[in-house]
Image (cartoon, helix red, strand yellow):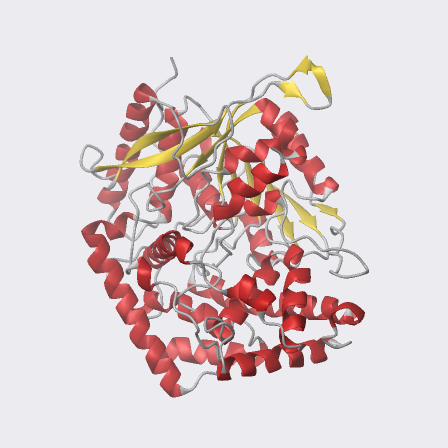
Amino acid sequence: MRAAVLYSAAGSLLLTTLAAAPAPAVPHAPARTGVPGASAAAEARGSAEAAARARRTGVAFGACPADLPAPSGMRCGTVSVPLDYAHPSGRRIELTVSRMPATGKDPRNSKRRVPRQGALVYNPGGPGASGMAFPMIGVVPQWKRIAAAYDLIGYAPRGVERSAPLSCEDPARFFKAPTQAPVHPTEAYKRERITRAKAYARGCAERSGSGLRFFNSLNNARDLDVLRAALGEDRLTFMGASYGTYLGAVYGTLFPSHLRRMVLDSAVDPDPAQVWYRDNLAQSAAFEGRWADFREWAARHDDVYGLGNTAEKVQAAYDTAARRLAAEAAGGKVGPGQLQNTFLMAGYYDDFWPSRAAALSAYLKGDAKPLIGLAVPSPGMAAEAENGSAVYTAVECNDAPWPTDWKVWDRDNTRLARVAPFETWDNAWTNLPCAYWQAPRQQPLDVRTGPGELPAVLILAAERDAAAPYAGALEMNRRLSGSVLVTERDAGTHGIAGGPNACVNAHLDAYLLEGRLPARRAACGPRPEPLPDGPAGRGSEQSPRDALKGKGERTAASGRS
């Protein structure tokens, strides 16, 4: 499951917008982990041992890294976790953690003190995203009530940034531009991509060594429980977005008695049969619908952009740009691959629609500067992007079986590209290293809880979300007994908590602050459509909340596209 890398800009965006507990119980041993039962039991015991050790040690919070522009009061530290939970006294790795203490101030009444409710731990998804910037969200108006009651906790999961970082290739070679993006690739192009996928998988194994196998969702969930204990929390209040919803569901299945409250924002499909090969096919199909949403919006604003007054004409304008860029890259760096990546971002966040439509319009009229500004990969982000890509690949490839016969990939993606050409093959190339992965595979955990096993969970989903198709939220709702789904109707932005929809935010606040949920599934109306750039109004590029929605599964302007 891919999602856009936005989090690296979160800090600067937010700043410009402102200014003695009982020993933990042994968790359930997963029923289907792909390892022998004795190993699963050993990992369960190791997880309990690591959590007990973390409870005694805690987190020594101090100054945050210089590259994280932390506001006053925000502190950072580390938590030690085992690389291999079957051997908790063996090699350990350090996870970085950030915290902003609860303000205790009611934003609606400055004289009223708000009782502290503990720590709220956030995972922005990916896999491969860092949540270290998350505590800064407390300054955004929609989050101030939550920030009054909770310590806001972010962290970098294993493999990410300073948390035992993974790498699969030299970051200096990661951004390759310009690149092609054929929607119906030739046999020669397919052979080239197979060669690149094999090389990437081989690089992951060579650069990460024998420890590569331990970067998976089960260990991410165990790390989360160690973090809970290190924070001194008997029960975890957790919020996950995108892949973070799968992590939360795995955590809830392994550690149901350790949960207090959990919000799953933009839920992915946790069905073991879908993780992760079929989930990615479903995602590619859903992006076709979001691409249509953008084209229809641009057509309604033909008076501003001049891309055509029908979705078909907007598609023709896009195709014209792709052909021109294939013949001559804009600025020497923007080819069809960079164009596709830039417009893929519009599939995640409709705040991006105005800037993308304006850049396409300008390029077709002879001005390439706006498109170059959006699409050229930033050399300064190469190391960060390569690390995120490596973690994404490692976790998804390790988590589940993938087809190892190229004929299966070719058959499935060829069929899908006939009806969903926009993203299908680009997504396939991102995931193809999993066909040639050299580390052992697991069987996905059967995420499922029975009545009363888990506290009530709040699931949030946009009906037209492409990165996490809505069917996944329905499946998550079915599998987590007692969970409640709140849907943002006729909307497709990826990640809806704490955004502009007051109805969604009212459900979020009621749950986190008072423990109240709707009696059954609830629906909210859509957020307003973005305004076009030009005389009719100004569209916004990105809200501060959107900046924290997570990194995901592949970077914009990725060198692997």
Q: Tell me if 412 is positioned left or right of 359 in this view.
A: left
Image location (x, y in percent) of residue 129? 44, 48
Image location (x, y in percent) of residue 317? 66, 79
Q: Tell me if 192 is positioned left or right of 134 in this view.
A: left
Q: Nearer the viewer, residue 456 or 386?
A: 386
* Residue at (66% x, 43% y) in the render: 499
Image location (x, y in percent) of residue 266? 58, 50
* Residue at far bottom of view: 187
Residue 286 in sight from this viewpoint: no
Rendered view: 145 above or below 459: above
Question: Looking at the rendering, which quadrant does residue 483 occupy?
Answer: top right
Image location (x, y in percent) of residue 277? 43, 64
- Total labels drawn: 0
Rendered view: 365 above or below 33: below
Question: Looking at the rendering, which quadrant does residue 304 occupy?
Answer: bottom right
Q: Nearer the viewer, residue 362 or 474?
A: 362
